[in-house]
Amino acid sequence: MRYLSGIQPTGRLHLGNYFGMIRPAVELQAKGEAYYFLADYHALTGAASPGQLPGLVQETFLDLLGCGVDPDKAVVFRQSAVPEVHELAWYLSTVTPMGLLERCHSYKDKVAKGISPSHGLFAYPVLMAADILLYDADRVPVGQDQKQHLEVARDIAGKFNEKYGPVFKLPESIIRDDAGVVPGVDGQKMSKSYNNTLEIFAPEKDLRKAVMGIKTDSTPVEAPKAVEGSTLWGLARLMGTEGERAEFRAKMEKGGTGYGDLKKMLADMVLKEFAALRNRREELAADPRKVARWMEEGKAKARKTAEGVLARVRAAVGTKS
C-alpha cells in the first residue's frame, strides 16, 4: 500500500498542519510505503517570493522531520526536484475538461477572496493530479475540504485510461477528520492565509504571546465560560492527557478562572505537548549535512518511481523514443 501527501512550504508549520496532515502522515509511514512532498510549485500560486522559497522549503523539511516524519521510512522530497511532474501534467491536461476545472471549489474560493486569477491557479488541480498519479499512490489522506481535489484526480485518471488504456491506478481517499477544525487565534480555521496560527516551533516567548492574543468574549472571571464553540477549548481538547483536558474543561464550566489564566494554562499545555518535537528539530537543525543528504536521498527515490510511471505514460501516448 502506497500513501501520498503533500504540504506547501509557505510558512512555519502550525497546530492545524500538525493535527490535520502531519500526525496522520507519521502514523501512515509505519503501515506501508509513504511519499511526502513539499509542494513548492503549488506555493507559487500564493504569496511565496523567489527569495523566500528556498528557505521555506528547508524550514518545512526540518519541521516535518522534527514532527516525526522519518526519511528512513518515508520518501520525503521537494516537488520541484522531480521535473517529470510537469511532463505528466501536460499529458493529463490534454484530457481534462474545462468544466471540471471551472467547478473546483479552491479556485472559486480564492478568486472570491480577491486573489488574482491566473492559469496556474486555475490549472492547480491538474498539477495536483500529476503529483498523485506520478507515484502510483493507492491512498491519499485528505481533509473534508480537500476531498474534491482527489475526486478531480480520479476523474482525470479515468479520462486518460479511457483514451489510452489502463495506465493509471485510481487512488482512493482516506478522509481525515482533521481533528475537527483546528481554530486559529481569531476563531476561524487555523491557516497561514488568515495569519491566525500558533506555530509549533515558534520561540516560547512568541508562542505564549500568540496564545494570550486568542480572542475571547467578555464573560467575567467568576462566571462559567462557554465550552462549545470556544477557541480555547477547541485547542485544549487536542492537548495533553485525558486528565489535563478534563481539568481545563472543568475550570471553564465551573467559573472562577479568568480567560487570562486559562490562556496561560493552554500555553503550558501546548509547550508540553510539543516539547520532545521541538528538541528533535533543534538536534536536526544542528546537523545540516545529514538533512541535505536526506533531501538528496528522497529526491533520488522519488525520481526513480516517477521515471518508471512516466515511461508507461509515454508508451501509451506515443511519445516514447
Image (cartoon, rainbow, N blue to C red):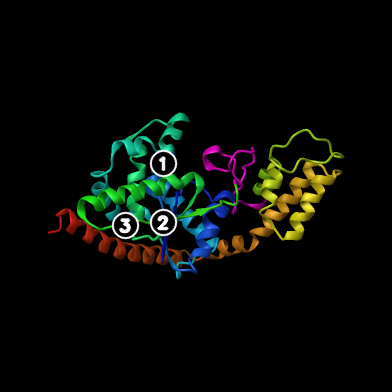
Q: What amino acid is at disc 3?
A: Leu
Q: Residue at x 59, y 46 (%)?
A: 181
Q: What amino acid is at disc 1?
A: Ser
Identify the residue position indicated by label 3 in the image. 134
3 vs 1, front mark: 3
- Of pointers 3 and 1, the one earlier in the residue sequence: 1
Q: Residue at x 59, y 44 (%)?
A: 197
**Frontmost residue, 35 versus 193:** 35
Q: CA distance from mark 3 to mark 1?
A: 27 Å
Mark 3 element type: loop
> From which residue to which does the magenta span run?
181-205
Q: What amino acid is at disc 2?
A: Glu
Residue 251 screen position, x and y as percent: 82, 48
Mark 1 element type: loop
- Of pointers 2 and 1, the one earlier in the residue sequence: 1
Q: CA distance from mark 2 to mark 3?
A: 15 Å
Residue 192 in view of the camera: yes
Left/right of residue 64 with respect to residue 253 in the rendered view? left
Mark 1 and mark 2 in contact (Cβ < 8 Å)?
no
Q: Is residue 287 above or below residue 203?
A: below
Q: Residue 49: give its label.
A: 1
Q: Residue 172: give its label.
A: 2
Q: Is residue 92 above or below residue 316?
A: above
Left/right of residue 307 with respect to residue 104 in the rendered view? left
Q: Residue at x 50, y 59 (%)?
A: 64
Looking at the rendered image, the quarter that the N terminus falls into is bottom left
Looking at the rendered image, the quarter that the C terminus falls into is bottom left
Q: Is residue 24 above or below residue 47?
A: below
| Residue 134 falls in image quadrant | bottom left
**Is-magenta flag for residue 196?**
yes
Mark 2 element type: strand
- Of pointers 2 and 3, the one earlier in the residue sequence: 3
